[in-house]
Image (cartoon, rainbow, N blue to C red):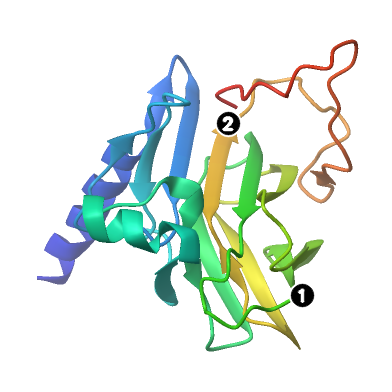
Amino acid sequence: MAVFLVLLAALVLVFALHVVGDEIELSIDCGLDDKYSDYMDPNTNLRYVPDGTFVDAGENHVVAAAAADQAKNGRADAIYSLRSFPSGKWNCYALPTATAATYLVRMQFLYGNYDNLSSSSVQFEIHLGSVPWDTVTVGLADTNATTKEAVFVAWAGWAPVCLVNTGRGTPFVSVVELRKLGDGLYPPVSGNQSMSMYDRRMMGTDAPVTRHSY
């Protein structure tokens, strides 16, 4: 029975990965009920999967504004659902990687008063394994998602991406995305040196930023 369960988990993981050429695309809708195996987002053409395969703790929620949509349609858009972690100091997603390959990981956070506490500020840390990545600070006034990105070299067949409770509110996450990058990109990144996004700007235009599949 144990062998069967391991094989079943591996099979689910294979189908969760979207492979484009030699590149791996994994887009996780955190908080999506496992009864929805996957779906295509009509705005980005990205295929999202639920997060139950990648994490074994936490609670599913939707932001307050999306509660009615979920009740009507059965599923909220990816950014409007989330998984919160009210228990434990550390809670980690285990993302599938290939040893020594370079990856971009993106996490998005939209509070949206999902807990009906109307918190003006929720703050917690995110880590790549045991290495601090960034501090997330969000609150009721944020109408757009907060995005954090990092580039790292995988040190094993899976990468732990962790949310750490610092006593300033319950950690949560709305979306986790993983993209395998081509060889030679970001030479400063190595097995013991990652990079995190400081800022992103679109130069030479007043048009809103257009979302690329990465």
Dot 1 falls on a residue whose secondary structure is: loop
* Sequence order check, earlier mark of 2 and 1: 1
Are circles 2 and 1 on residues that touch, CB within 8 Å? no
Which x, y percent locates residue 152? 72, 43
- Residue, disc 1: 121
Which is nearer the eye, 46 or 102? 46
Question: For this rendering, which residue is in front, 201 or 184?
Answer: 201
Q: Quadrant of residue 209?
A: top right
Mark 2 packing: few (<14 Cα in 10 Å), some, or many (20+)? many
Is residue 17 among what the camera can see?
Answer: yes
Residue at the spot x=48%, y=29% of the render?
A: 24
Within the image, what quadrant is residue 166 found in?
bottom right
Q: Which residue is mark 2?
A: 180
- Residue 37 lies left or right of residue 69; in this view the side is left
Percent across and percent down for residue 110 are 61, 58
- In the picture, the quarter occupied by the N terminus is bottom left
Vertical side of 115 occupied by 52: above or below: above
In the foreground, 149 or 111: 111
Counting from the top left corner in percent of width and height, residue 208 is at: 73, 23
Residue at mark 2 to residue at mark 1: CA–CA distance: 33 Å
Which residue occupies 33% across, 41% down?
A: 16
